[in-house]
Image: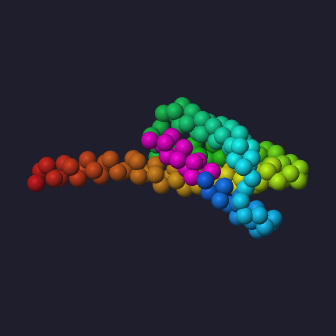
Amino acid sequence: MQPLYWLLTYGLSVIASFQIGELINRFVSGTADFNWQVPLIAMVPIITFGATQLIELALDYRRNEAPLLDWLLPGLTATGQSFRHRLFGIIVVCLGLLAVNFGPLTQAGLVVIAAVIVFNIALPIIAAAVGKLTVTLPQHTRKHRETTKEN
């Protein structure tokens, strides 16, 4: 279930990044909507970044033999170190896109930067909250079933 939660977190952060990018674009340039090319241009780096981050996180989780709650803090910390290096590289690439001064590339750069930042903020929060819920909820439901069978 954890990889599904991570994937949903990434999907929600991409949707939020399009909204944030549109708000920044409206504030800076005054245009209300994105050009039709922006989602197409932005999806390539967004999918590449998401795949590399989620696959690395899932492989680290599978390689480690510890239970989820024991893996969560060290696993996310170790993954966070490589996230920072990738984040730096993506921001440099997106700043290059912003410097081109071509509308769709600038807007796509805003979307990619927002997606990366939102995902890196939301993932530890969601992983910790839902991870604990995934482990503790089945134990509580099992105890509840056992007490109802006794009564």
* Residue 22 horizontal side relative to residue 12, left or right: right
* Region of the chain picked out in magenta, as a range: 1-14
> Where's residue 109, x and y in %?
77, 51
Quadrant hosting residue 19: bottom right
Residue 108 is left or right of residue 127, and the answer is right
The scheme the figure's colours follow is rainbow
Coordinates of residue 122 in the picture (x, y in percent): 59, 55
Residue at the outermost top position: 63
Q: Nearer the viewer, residue 31 or 144?
A: 31
Percent position of residue 84, x then y: 72, 47
In the image, what residue occupies the spot 10% across and 54% down? 151
In the rendered view, does 9 fall on the left or right side of 22? left
Q: Which residue shows up at 79% across the image and 51% down it?
A: 104
Q: Position of residue 40 (x, y in %)?
A: 71, 43
Q: Quadrant of the N terminus?
A: top left
Which sits in the foreground, 75 or 90?
90
- Taking the magenta stretch, the answer to whether it contains residue 105 is no
| In the image, residue 3 lies in the stretch drawn in magenta | yes
Whether residue 89 is visible to the viewer of this picture, yes or no, is yes
Task: Spot the residue most to the right.
Answer: 100
